Image (spheres, rainbow, N blue to C red):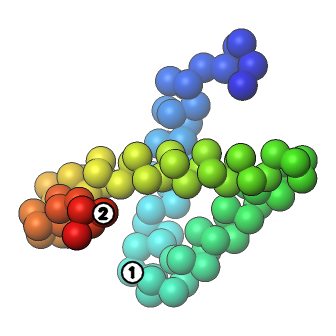
């Protein structure tokens, strides 16, 4: 990342894009949603030089994993998931 990277600005822009995309994916089957996201991940990874692709993919997956608890809470609050979804599946 460059010294002028503004994480908060990037997060705000990302949140705005997610809110635009969310209604498009709502109601789609898990297969369609999953393959759509897979194509977007492939675009992200392909946009890196070959030697940076493994670390770029790892960074992306680490970021997504860290966001799962936040998304679960949002889903529970919206009534789209039961409270049991808070359970950490890694411990099972």
Picture coordinates of residue 22, whole percent (x, y): 44, 62
Q: Quadrant of the N terminus?
A: top right
- Lower sequence index among marks 1 and 2: 1
From what the image shows, is residue 28 above or below residue 48? Answer: below
- Answer with left or right where residue 92 lies relative to residue 49: left
Q: Which residue is mark 2?
A: 90
Circle 2 sits in a helix, a strand or a loop, which is it? helix
- Answer with left or right where residue 8 lies relative to residue 52: left
Compare residues 89 and 76 and report the one nearer the observer. 89
Residue that extends furthest to the front in the rendered view of this protein: 91
Picture coordinates of residue 76, whole percent (x, y): 16, 60
Q: Which residue is mark 1?
A: 27
Residue in the picture at 30% in, 47% down: 70
Compare residues 21 and 60 and report the one nearer the observer. 60
- Answer with left or right where residue 53 lies relative to residue 66: right
- State which quadrant residue 2 falls in: top right
Residue in the picture at 55% in, 25% down: 7
Residue in the picture at 50% in, 24% down: 8
Query: CA gap, disc 1 to disc 2?
Result: 28 Å
From what the image shows, is residue 90 above or below residue 28? Answer: above
Compare residues 16 and 50 and report the one nearer the observer. 50
Answer yes or no: is residue 65 visible. Answer: yes
């Amino acid at each position: 990342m460059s010294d002028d990277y503004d994480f908060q600005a990037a997060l705000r822009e990302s949140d705005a894009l997610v809110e635009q995309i969310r209604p498009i994916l709502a109601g789609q089957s898990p297969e369609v949603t999953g393959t759509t996201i897979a194509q977007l991940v492939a675009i992200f990874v392909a946009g890196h030089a070959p030697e940076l692709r493994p670390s770029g993919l790892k960074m992306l997956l680490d970021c997504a994993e860290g966001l799962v608890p936040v998304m679960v809470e949002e889903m529970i609050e919206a009534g789209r998931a039961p409270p049991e979804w808070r359970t950490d599946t890694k411990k099972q």
